[in-house]
Amino acid sequence: MFGLPASNGQPGSAQSSLKPPTVTSPDPAPAFDVAAIYVHIPQPHEHNSIWSSPFDGQFRAVNVTVKSLVQFAFGIPETRIRNGPAWINTTSFNIDAKADSAVDAQMRALTSAEGKARKQRMVQALLANRFKLLTHTETRELPVYALVLAKGGPRFGAIQQNGTTVNSGRGRIEVEGSNRPDLSSGPL
């Protein structure tokens, strides 16, 4: 859950009486040393992207909404983000942020999971500082579905493998149900 002041969508234009959330992590996250944030000017057929390596102190986002940044920074699905102003879904930003060389050196010494967690905390601090993001957690009761067996038990039949299935994409090929030796004999 989070709250953003209802401003005109410009970073830093919210009231100054809002304070960033207190971070209760055991080791304080380093902050970005420099961050440039601009409102994105849309072009036809654009993509949105976040570039973030867990092994350095750099962060780049292009054509990304604040809601997407919150998803990245907190690792939560969009459905758990509530109560923000309308512009968090419609106004996109370009962000270039960089930490100093000491933070880069620290990040290189971390595991991938530790680096990702630290980078997320750095982005959280950026959101609190520049967008005046305020967060809180709460427990909610939501509907749940229970999968139960029908009377008489399941009625699944045995799987019939009588063909070849080929799936491919992004540099991979998956083949199931084939006994053709030419598929495993090297380059075609």
Image (cartoon, grey):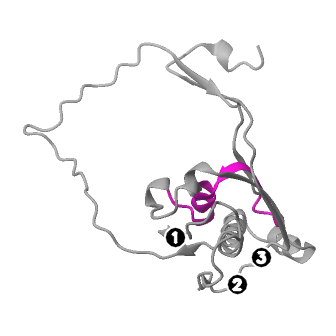
Residue 3: numbered disc: 1
Q: Secondary structure at mark 1?
A: strand
Q: Which residue is mark 3?
A: 31
Image height of 21 relative to 107, above or below = below
Q: Position of residue 75 (x, y in %)?
A: 56, 61
Q: Please identify the quadrant where the C terminus is shown.
A: top right
Q: Position of residue 67 (x, y in %)?
A: 57, 57
Count of numbered tags: 3
Three-letter amino acid code of the residue under disc 2: Pro
Nearest to the observer: residue 182 or residue 98: 98
Is residue 173 something one can see in this rendering?
no
| Foreground label between 2 and 1 | 1
Density class for disc 1 (Cα within 10 Å; few <14, some 14-19, many ≥20) is some
Image height of 77 relative to 180, above or below = below
Q: Which residues are magenta?
A: 53-77
Is residue 54 inside the magenta stretch?
A: yes
Residue 120: numbered disc: none
Q: Secondary structure at mark 2?
A: loop
Q: Secondary structure at mark 3?
A: loop
Nearest to the observer: residue 188 or residue 87: 87
Residue at image location 62% in from the left, 81% down from the top: 20
Is residue 92 inside the magenta stretch?
A: no
Residue at image location 16% in from the left, 43% down from the top: 149
Residue 28: numbered disc: 2
- Chain-order first, disc 1 or disc 3: 1
